[in-house]
Image (cartoon, rainbow, N blue to C red):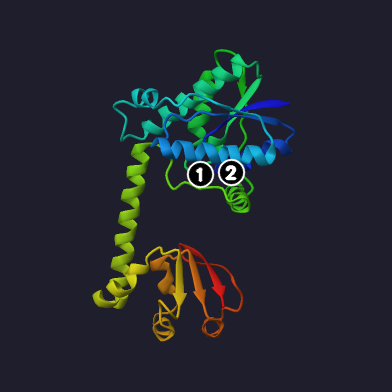
Amino acid sequence: MKIFLHVCCAPDLTVSYRKLVEQGFEPVVFFYNPNIYPLQEYSKRFEEVKKLRDIWGFQLYVGDYEPDKFLERIKGKEHSPNRCYECMKLRLEKTKSEAKRMNFSIYSTTLLASPRKSHDDILEITDNLDMEENPSFKYVNFRSNNGVHMAAQICKTYNIYRQNYCGCSFSLEESKRYEEESKQKNYKSLVEILGEELTQKYFKYYKKDLLRIPQDIPAKFLEKVGLQFFKYLKPQIILIKKEIAQDFNIFTSSRYKIDNWKGKVILW
């Protein structure tokens, strides 16, 4: 059975598409996201959806890019929680309208896969929409049974871009503000442990793509501060000599987690 599936982004589409197919549905994908800012980001996210289309072979439709409609809808609510509600409502209204025009009996949305979105809000919106006429909304909890982790794994398999903010200019500002606050918090935590001078020396590696040991961080220094040091620097990848890694009971290249930091450790 075909289902008209609104897609907000490729990462959320991955698990949504897989789970719908497992349930016997044939998703027809509809990309409509007038909230995404800037245009380059909109284009990038759409290209990632097309990448999945080329892999999985689903039908893909795209709505007009209408940022003015989004801005008009959220006017006066730009910095309110209601902004997200109105944004979802706008996209779901359009999805239902297109589904009706194309004679679909059911529709759904990948917003249900996003850990940032409220299922209660989505159901309230769609319940009100479905009071009028068909098509009807199909609710699936795409986040259940490790759905978020599954999406991350599929993105890794197909090298899918994973954005770090919801989409609109306001969420981008909020994301940047949160990132700066997080950076300052980690800096202050390191100062308490190392002092100002050493923190300034090593904090230049904060969130660096590749951190090398011993080239960037001397082995003797790491012995003093321990592996907890990395949770403040949060590197993506740590490249460490085998003989040094063994001193910390690390014997294989793998992903490691220390508190709220996760990164890949590669032995050489």
Please identify the quarter of the rendering in which residue 211 is found: bottom left
Residue 155 appears in view: yes
Residue at (29, 27) in percent of width and height? 76
* Percent x, y of residue 246: 56, 83
Residue 143 shows which numbered tag?
Answer: 2
Question: Is residue 84 toward the left or the right of residue 141 in the image?
Answer: left
Label 2: which secondary element:
loop
State the residue position of label 1. Answer: 115
Q: Quadrant of residue 201?
A: bottom left
Mark 1 crowd level (few <14, some 14–19, many ≥20, 10 Å Cα): few
- What residue appears at the point 55 percent right and 13 percent down from the top-left corner? 132
Amino acid beneath label 1? Pro
Specify whether residue 167 is in view.
no
Q: Position of residue 80 (x, y in %)?
A: 32, 34
Q: Is residue 16 above or below residue 194?
A: above
Q: CA distance from mark 1 to mark 2?
A: 7 Å
Q: At x 30% / y 35%, what residue is drawn? A: 79
Numbered tag placed on residue 13 in the rendering: none
Residue situated in front as seen by the camera: 157 or 12: 157
Q: Does 82 sit above or below residue 14?
A: above
- Quadrant location of the N terminus? top right
At horizontal 31% and vertical 55% (from top left) the residue drawn is 180
Picture coordinates of residue 264 (x, y %)?
53, 66
Mark 1 in CB contact with mark 2 (< 8 angstroms): yes
Frontmost residue, 22 versus 153: 153
User: Circle 2: is it few (<14), some (14-19), or many (20+) Cα within 10 Å?
Assistant: some
Q: Amino acid at mark 2?
A: Arg
Of the pair 112 and 173, the residue shown nearer to us: 173
Disc 1 element? loop
Viewport quadrant of the C terminus = bottom right
